[in-house]
Image (cartoon, rainbow, N blue to C red):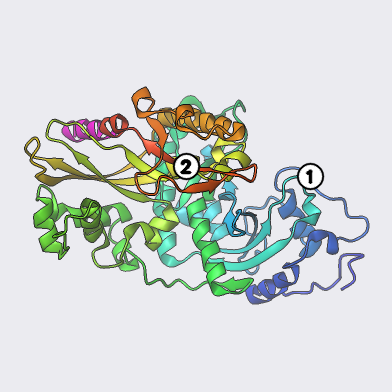
Amino acid sequence: MERNKIPEILPYDKADAASIFDYSKELLGHCLREFIWEGYEPKKGKGALGQMVENIFFFLETNSNPSSDFSEAGIELKCTPLKKSKQDDYLIKERLVCNMINYFEVVEEDFEHSHFYLKCQLMLLLFYLHQSGCNNLDLEFLFSVLWKLPEKDLMIIRHDYDVIIDKIRQGKAHELSEGDTMYLGACRKGQKGDSLMAQPYSPEGAPRRAFSLKMAYMRTVLDFVLKSGKNATTNFPTSDSELVSSKALHKHSFDEIILNRFNPYLHKSYEQIARRRGVDISRNPKNKFAIIANAIAASEKCANVNRSEEFLKAGLTMKTIRVQADGKIKEAMSFENIDYIEVAECDNWIDSRLYELYSSRFMFVVFKERHQGKADYVLDDVFFWTMPQSDLEWAEKYWNHIRVNVLAGHVFEEYWWKGADRKKFHVRPKAQKAIDMAPMPDGGSAKKFCYWFNNDYVCEIVEKRRKEVLNG
């Protein structure tokens, strides 16, 4: 097609989802510069790429209507960046921002009439490869996926939406956290130091936020595309790794369903639970408490709850904690190894992998020793937890310290925060394979180190939870 003017007849049927999706395939493997017509003035600033895809490729006029971009077909167009790892794998670069939150308007809307619901039930997601310093017109588009939010995902997202709105109605918009919810987040927008927004039920200003699908959720969408083996695909709402059914979600929230699975086992010994769940711990594996917790949470629905559909999409992580009879916790809590390349390339804390990891939700399964030194642990508590904002500020200092040392090539024990520093977090290798090496930004390699919660910080979390339960 000649791209010297806007055509009188569109090359797709704007009322037909299949036609729009098929037409989008022509953009794959290409950049917008190949389609731009003479006289078009390129857009600049945030959201410029999406606007130019609308204008240049789809011949749509940019507008701020609450309805979806292809309103007649009910499709919202979203462009979202990928990055490449050193191993040449495609990775999600950021969460998918859906629409800004107007604190005064959202408290008057129910989910079915919200801008998010009206726009994002069905989305045409165009994945492109991010290149630092590259002109938007020269970015290559890689994948197109017509993604309909599955019924079960929408049920969880609806609950997420209600959690966010309830917090705003309580006058706590300034306390919103992405860790409050499963799939739908209220992500920060703008920069540190930007002026705060007014909120309806409190005189305190709140940061600008937007509804977004979390990076963990977007990662499952990308995995779906890559597993299809096609550069253009669409989804079907089926899964063989689900923890809960749509039918169950009609009656209870996801949290209630999972917690209810643990209730019959509270205050039972881990040996009793293992027998009742048919878990073989005769060889006394080191991870026996995690195996037992998984057997309860999974309820024979999947092999590993942390790899289940819901946990992956929510970025939710189950962790077990062992508390000694005297209330102390001996073991620190380990997380993933530090990706030195990611740390070096990310210059914004909120976009970092560690922020995603620490601002996500956790499910803690607590086993407590009944008699000091006897290792006679019982299931004591199970609860969902989100890191408070004050601790996230500590985590930002932790990340900045790590980043400064990675950029300086100081990847050695003497440079990291240590557990003895009592700064909530520390860095050290995991016990096994501590000599393994990981790539560095300068092309070399360094010893693998891991993110950790201090044991005293884990103890603080459990103690605070205990006091909350006692106080009702």
Tell me if residue 461 comes above or below residue 133 in the rendering: above
Tell me what residue is drawn at x 38 percent, y 56 percent.
311
What type is the residue that disc 2 sits on?
A: Val
Main secondary structure found in the magenta portion: helix
Which is more N-terminal, label 1 or label 2?
1
Q: Residues within 10 Å of mark 1 (few under 14, many from 20)?
A: few
User: Which residue is located at x 55 percent, y 62 percent?
Assistant: 222
The magenta stretch is 461-472
Disc 1 residue type?
Lys
**Quadrant of residue 5 within the rendered picture:** bottom right
Q: Which residue is mark 1?
A: 44
**Height in image: 314 above or below 393?**
below
Secondary structure under tag 1 reads loop
The picture quadrant where one finds residue 280 is bottom left
* Residue found 60% across the figure and 39% down from its top: 344
| Mark 2 vs 1: CB contact within 8 A | no
* Residue 247 visible in the current orientation: yes
The image shows residue 102 at horizontal and vertical percentages of 56, 40
- In terms of secondary structure, where does tag 2 sit? loop
Q: Is residue 285 within the magenta segment?
A: no
Query: Residue 246, percent across and down?
Result: 35, 66
- Magenta stretch contains residue 470: yes
- Residue 107 got which mark? 2
Can you say whether 157 is above or below 132 in the image? below
One can see residue 207 in this view: no
